[in-house]
Image (cartoon, rainbow, N blue to C red):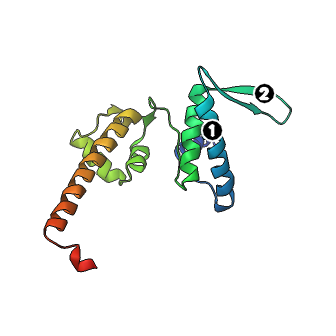
Amino acid sequence: MPVHARKKEAEARRVEPVTAPPEQREDVRALSAVLAHVGHRAKGRSSGLSLEGRRGERAVVPRAVFSVLERAVKGLARGEAVTVISVAQELTTQEAANILNVSRQYLVRLLNEQAIPHTKTGKHRRLRLGDVLVYKRRRDAQRKKALTGLTRLSQELGLYDDLR
């Protein structure tokens, strides 16, 4: 496999969500509890946590790294898929579509409608992760508002009584 293909594959794996296999979930929950306990006690720049390597080398976990680790482990403990991505990262249209859980063709339509900022390099479009996440939050908020309205309307019309 050519070097550029291996590099692209490694980048794709970095964006691909990770889940804890069922046999690891109990260990992940235990780690989450330890991190929560350590996090409440930690103050200042240090998290109060250090890692030890196979050869005895030690590294203090900075507070920023601890925060990312704690969030990722909490998600895994709940059975969620987790991905850590640099916010300034540029995404391909397929990567952005994956984050939004839409088809690439639908994403391109959104770009053509200027719903999400993007740049064009030759024939390729690139999106900033931060812009994709802003769009996702706005879309999710609109969906939640619409669903809340539908639920309220269904309750007012007595449609939930039929389900009992």
Please give the label number shown on residue 58.
2
**Mark 1 or mark 2: which is in front?**
1
The residue that appears at 33% across and 33% down in the rendered structure is 120
Please give the label number shown on residue 118.
none
Tell me: 104 left or right of 158: right
- The residue carrying pointer 1 sits among few (fewer than 14), some (14 to 19) or many (20 or more) residues within 10 Å by Cα, namely few
Q: Pick the residue in front: 16 or 26.
A: 26
- Can residue 92 be seen here? The reply is yes
Residue 77 in the image: x percent, y percent? Answer: 58, 52
Q: Which residue is mark 1?
A: 37
Q: Which label's residue is closer to the chain start, 1 or 2?
A: 1
Residue 114 in the image: x percent, y percent? Answer: 23, 38
Q: Quadrant of the C terminus?
A: bottom left
Residue 91 in the image: x percent, y percent? Answer: 43, 38
Q: Pick the residue in front: 46 or 119.
A: 46
The residue that appears at 21% across and 42% down in the rendered structure is 113
Residue 12 in the image: x percent, y percent? Answer: 54, 44
- Can residue 1 be seen here? The reply is no
Tell me: 152 left or right of 117: left
Tell me: 88 left or right of 8: left
Q: Work out whether 40 lies above or below 138.
A: above
Mark-to-mark CA distance, 1 and 2: 21 Å
Please state which amino acid type lies under the numbered disc 2.
Arg
Residues tagged 1 and 2 counted as in contact (Cβ below 8 A): no
Q: Work out whether 44 lies above or below 118.
A: above
